[in-house]
Image (cartoon, coloured by chain):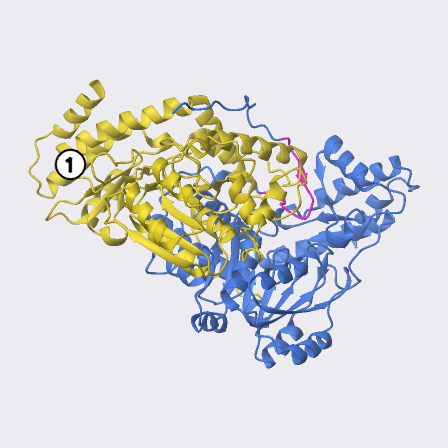
Chain colours: A yellow, B blue
Amino acid sequence: MPIASPSRTFAPLNPPQRLLLGPGPSDVHPRVLAAMTLPLLGHLDPAFVAMMDETKEMLRYVFQTKNPMTLALPGTGSSGMESAFVNLIEPGDSVLICVVGYFGERMVDMTERLGAKVHVIEKPYGEAFDPSEVRDAVKKHAPKVVGIVHAETSSGVLQPLEEIVKIVHEAGALIVVDAVTSLGCVPVMTDEWGLDVVFSCTQKGLSCPPGMAPISFSPKAVETIHARKTKVPNWYLDVSLLSKYWGSDRAYHHTAPISMAYALREGLSLVIEETLEARFARHVRNQKALKAGLQALGLTYVAAEGFQVPAVHAVRIPDGIDDLTIRKRLLNDMGIEIGGGLGSLKGKAWRIGLMGQGSKERNVLLLLGALEVCLRDAGCSLKPGAALEAAGAAYAG
Amino acid sequence: MPIASPSRTFAPLNPPQRLLLGPGPSDVHPRVLAAMTLPLLGHLDPAFVAMMDETKEMLRYVFQTKNPMTLALPGTGSSGMESAFVNLIEPGDSVLICVVGYFGERMVDMTERLGAKVHVIEKPYGEAFDPSEVRDAVKKHAPKVVGIVHAETSSGVLQPLEEIVKIVHEAGALIVVDAVTSLGCVPVMTDEWGLDVVFSCTQKGLSCPPGMAPISFSPKAVETIHARKTKVPNWYLDVSLLSKYWGSDRAYHHTAPISMAYALREGLSLVIEETLEARFARHVRNQKALKAGLQALGLTYVAAEGFQVPAVHAVRIPDGIDDLTIRKRLLNDMGIEIGGGLGSLKGKAWRIGLMGQGSKERNVLLLLGALEVCLRDAGCSLKPGAALEAAGAAYAG
């Protein structure tokens, strides 16, 4: 049994240093990185179990909920979406997905795979739904589950949810909310609004590395899961099994990602130290300044006025400017990452993230300065310093 | 919209220091922990894409395969099992699962959830299958897919695979192999043996934190996936989508767990530096010494002679000795974790792991000394130093 050698030699791991101002991952706090170097515990160690209990309580704070079934899944944010739907939906169920961008489209793909009868209402990238549009669709399709994205990472749209949740509940349906880009950046009022399943990620508003998916299920969602006629066709993301693992009987399921769990707990500690109120205010303050600066650079927002999420600024690339030329210059010469467009906005928009730890004045000013230089080099006629002046005025005002 | 405060205050994260000699997670090399503190890259950053390409090549070495579709899933080892089956199986497919312990039982649960016609052959914990038993079952059930565990973490059984794979292939079926506890500890000869899907975890033989699942698909497995009549009912673990993300077109799927990916690459570097040959020899050497010592303590193996995996030593708890008393003493007084029994061995067996980085003389001697003290305190009549003497003789001989 001769062992084959590796195909070649490999240099030591040496990633370049970037400032992450794209749609995620975003910059991680040094305390979070340090937490990952703490000694590993076994996942059934009483000390680790206590830590998971604390994490659940901390998550309840960021989700603003008392839901007992609030935990972090052992996968990235997308596993949160998968888990929400695979646990609620049984084949043949009527599902309504409200699509305002790429992540709504993903909900359609996922729920179709689960054998649901999927009904879709759709808005162009940049717009949000008016509650009346959801009312009409709910009336027409009588869904068991309605899926909607709170903050569309692809278009930078923040979808108001309160009215829509009321409509969904009046129709006897459950609402699944993608809070991947909103949690930790803007209010996600799970109990006050009545969200049935709400999930997020670790690498945006919580400023941890990607790798886990915080998720919360309302008592009604749990009831629905318990009343299933069929077993959840996904062992890994079955929340009944997961909640026994996270619960008092501590029944073995998967092996929790220990170091990522440390990171998440440290990230949540930082949120609690800052308080959600201060964190939301900081995101709004930096949003205003970045927006003033980007507009001074002649960039227009994809998201309609009044519906722009502070976490991701999606702006249209000016005519005659090449997407990749600018993004490569920012990345290679200046070590700054911003995101390109997704879905129908590919090549047509940039997405600038100010999320969690990354939402700070220093980053706003640096990005505006760098972008101005790049745009001027690419032939844009811009008044030197206009963006910084506008941002400065926003901060002052 | 008043924000509710956290339920209480939380102390800083401060996990106790443990020596992890259970069935996983196992000890992590300091270089792996350090890798996780490297600056985060965006998951579409060319520098990160290059790192993923390197990781694929490194994984091909540890799996001993040329399979292009070799990658690491964004979930723990169980997500590897889920991905293997959900990609290959369509509702109504005939599946044969060969069960010799807890993780075989998990395969049954998972595949039933996918709507397969699941046929099971079973052996008591501690035994392995004889190829003839698999031949009979394959003849009877004509499965499309056969699932089997290479190293059963619950019983410490190493299942020889070469003959079984031949039988499965002669019958035109595909074989799915759980190498969670074998990869990096004992040879997993993917191409030589002809494994169709083989998956593992990061926290055992590769000495990383838990959180990713290395997996490899043979060209025939890929063909089978491409020939599906139905979409994979699991968006998150659909390998067609995952392979586009890990492949040259780099199509956006999930957001890779960046820091965990750093850890995995560093763990793989350590394997390459040591070489698989030296690593396997080290595991066998420490297995012999631990076994000699455990037997000198009067402990008997669950796994039959000749079928014991070096990575996990499952031994029966002597009559009159209480499982938890001993394990709590080891954990709380000595900071050493060993595992309890799983499934039908709950309360009846201990599982001692010597995996990857953790398989070393120092750990063998420490564990034997500590266990002797605990057992003597619990009333076992043992000759002082007998375990260490036996282990020493094994190392010398």
Q: Outermost residue, right direction?
A: B381
**What's drawn in magenta, residue-wise?**
B16-28
Q: A319 or B303, which lies in front? A: A319
- Quarter location, residue A112: bottom left
Is residue B227 covered in magenta? no
Residue appearing at x 49%, y 32% in the figure: A65
Look at the image and tell me in which quarter the N terminus of chain B lies: top left
Residue A346 visible at all: no
Is residue B22 a member of the stretch shown in magenta? yes
Residue ID for mark 1 = A373
On screen, B378 above or below B50? Answer: above
User: In this rendering, would B388 be left or right of B246?
Assistant: right
Report the amino acid beneath label 1: Val
Q: Secondary structure at mark 1?
A: helix
Q: Residue B101: x, y in percent?
A: 71, 59
Q: Position of residue A385 (x, y in %)?
A: 12, 28
Q: Is residue B81 visible?
A: yes
How crowded pointer 1 is (Cα within 10 Å; few <14, some 14-19, many 20+) is rated as: some
The residue lying at 19 percent from left, 49 percent from top is A348
* As drawn, A278 above or below B381: above
Q: Left or right of A382: which side holds B330?
A: right
Query: Is residue A321 shown left or right of residue A77?
Result: left
- Residue B152: which quarter of the image? bottom right
Which chain is indicated by disc 1? Answer: A
**Which image quarter holds the C terminus of chain B?**
bottom right
The spot of residue B203 in percent (x, y) is 59, 48
Q: Main secondary structure of the magenta part?
A: loop
Q: In the rendered image, which quarter is residue B26 located in?
A: top right
